[in-house]
Amino acid sequence: MKIRWNIIVHSFLSLFVPLVLTLVAWFFHDILIPSNVLLIYLLGVFFVAILSSVLASLISAATFKFFFSPPIFSLKIADFDNLMGLVIMLIVGTVTSKLTENLRVKSKLIENKERKASALYGLSKALAESRSEKEIIHVAVHHIYAEFKSLNTFLFPDRQRLVHYPDESPLNISLQTVNLNVANWAFQHGQIAGKDTANSPNESCVYIPL
């Protein structure tokens, strides 16, 4: 849903900004030459570049041609200079959009790396300060919940190598609806089982042997 909302915002700005610039340029068209009008549209393309400059470039080029480039109120291109200006605007908009997208992706990667490093440091520190098995399990359960926003629990094997719930009272973020049969299969075979895996994919939980 978030991706769809971003697409809607991008499309709206790509349509809205060129139209606003057209109104501004039309108001001053008596004192502006076509090259200056192109610069106004190019400024709008850079403004929208952080979202969707390719669409903005196409709309800006079309509106400039229709309202300001002879013949007026026509998409027919009669001036070679104006044609070159439109082509340059489209190229700049496309390149700007690509560069902006690359910067956005790199920024996200850096943020994710910093978040993971911070989370691992916090986990290591908390485990180092733990003084009992109970404290270690509490730290691990809270860490998994913080990272994945999902309920989880640890199951322990008995002398018959059958896993079961821990004897301690469950935490408020502990998962209490596991299928012990699937959990035992995962533990005995040393393979991940459960939701979206090759083993028992219809389960609602994921079982990871440790």
Image (cartoon, rainbow, N blue to C red):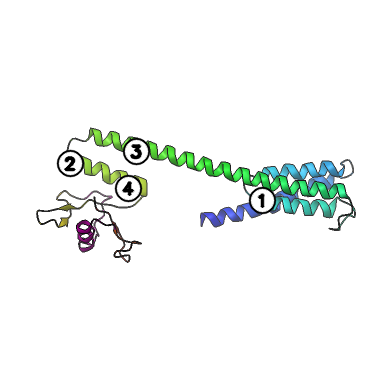
State which region is magenta.
170-192
Q: Quarter-wise, where is residue 92 in the image?
A: top right
Q: CA distance from mark 4 to mark 1?
A: 38 Å
Quickly name the residue at label 2. Answer: 133
The kind of residue on which mark 1 rests is Leu
Give the residue drawn at x 84%, y 46%: 27
Q: Is residue 79 visible?
A: yes
- Secondary structure found at label 2: helix
Q: Is residue 183 magenta?
A: yes
Q: CA distance from mark 2 to mark 4?
A: 18 Å
Quickly name the residue at label 4. Answer: 145
Sequence-first tag of 3 and 4: 3
Of 89 and 22, which appears nearest the observer? Answer: 89
Of 84 and 111, which appears nearest the observer? Answer: 84
Q: CA distance from mark 1 to mark 3?
A: 40 Å
Q: CA distance from mark 3 to mark 4?
A: 14 Å
Q: Could you tell whether 110 is left or right of 46 in the image?
A: left
Looking at the image, do the residues carrying marks 3 and 2 touch, with CB atoms under 8 Å apart?
no
